[in-house]
Amino acid sequence: MSVEHSAVLEGALAPAMNSRLFGHQEAEAFLAQSYKSGKGHHAILIEGPEGIGKATLAFRFANHILSHPEPAEAPSRLADPDPESIITRQLASAASHNLLHLARPVDEKTGRAKGAITVDEVRRAGKFFGQTSGTGNWRIVIVDPADDLNRNAANAILKMLEEPPPRSLFLVLTHAPGRLLPTVRSRCLPLRLKPLETADLRQALTHLGVDLAGPNAGRVLAAASGSVSEALKLVNYGGLDIAEAFEDILAGQGPGSRKSMHKLADVLSGRDSETIFDFFSSLLAGRIMQLAREAAIAGDVGRAERFARLSSSVGERLALSSAYNLDRKQTILSLLDDLKEAL
């Protein structure tokens, strides 16, 4: 009943196929022990920045439960999934009848993920529970991430959280819990994951076959901020060059800066540029919020408010650009112009 796994980053593994998790031993121990006690919560909100292992943890926990359906008989720790077990193979091939993975569906016309998890996707969870209600097995829904739920979908999930079926578990992932409906958050037990420490990030990248022995290793580890996905974008998608070009544009003036803006916008709006465009969008949003915080700390209220308004505007314009398939290059140039003006 799981959906097909969405495209993963070059060099990454789909969470259901990843046999290792680094840096979250406390969270793993908590989940294993709460399940074994028989008093675990029916909905767990797994919080933390993107790319630090939330989905991998969710699939590991799901594998643990489906492999040990009686809590009292389950081990007190989560083991690495056995690649030879039927349950592991079913989860890895999206063929498990006891797990539903809700994520943004793929648009058949464009081949790209749609902008939101819709209510139609959530309704699949209702059918999933109905079809499996007589088996007596655990039924697990992974919402990945809940940040992508539109309003109607969030309300539909809320109804299920309020009246969960027996032997059901919701693993709700979020990069930004503050954006979720308060009523959804209140129905879940929060489990906060922190960005990976440098040693854990190195181990995770080594597991994926990424060699950080080169001269840019320190820059990658620093810029990744404890996120495996950010590190992969920096290494495999030219993220370091994008970040350097972005900072040069902000510091530059005159025709040379304008030329650099167009060059960057061309790269970000080219074919198959979705990943690097998302990377740039996060980079832009993070830079603006950093400027807002710095202004607030310095006591410059007017400047802080200006960057806060720009931050809100950037999010809205990027969403509109995606929803209506607007000219991406012009959107990028406009955003860069506004940021430079605010500076």
Image (cartoon, rainbow, N blue to C red):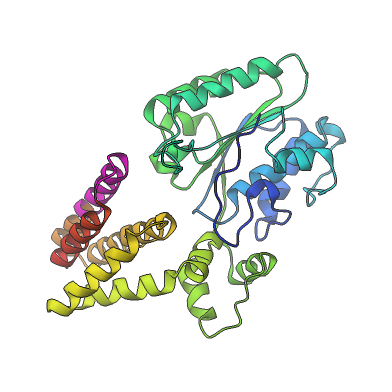
Towards the viewer: 253 or 200: 253
Q: Please name the residue shown 42% across and 56% down the image.
A: 272
Towards the viewer: 100 or 179: 100
Q: Is residue 325 magenta?
A: yes
Towards the viewer: 297 or 168: 168
Q: Is residue 244 left or right of residue 57?
A: left
In which quarter of the view is residue 214 placed?
A: bottom right
Q: Is residue 162 left or right of residue 92?
A: left
Q: Is residue 73 above or below residue 160?
A: below
Work out whether residue 253 can be spotted. Answer: no
In which quarter of the view is residue 42 placed?
A: top right
Residue 25 percent coordinates (x, y):
70, 56
> Magenta region, mostly helix, strand or loop?
helix
| Magenta segment boundaries in residue numbering | 309-326
Residue 262 percent coordinates (x, y):
22, 68
Number of numbered discs overlaid on the protein picture: 0
Residue 329 percent coordinates (x, y):
25, 58
Q: Please name the residue shown 27% across and 61% down the image.
A: 288
* Quadrant where the image shows the N terminus: top right
**In this view, which residue lies farthest toward the right?**
73
**In this view, which residue lies farthest toward the bottom?**
215
Q: Please name the residue shown 25% across and 46% down the image.
A: 326
Residue 144 percent coordinates (x, y):
53, 40
Q: Is residue 34 above or below residue 331?
A: above
Q: Is residue 18 magenta?
A: no
Work out whether residue 322 can be spotted. Answer: yes
* Quadrant where the image shows the C terminus: bottom left
Q: Is residue 281 left or right of residue 146?
A: left
Q: Is residue 120 above or below residue 49?
A: above
Q: Please name the residue shown 47% across and 66% down the image.
A: 237
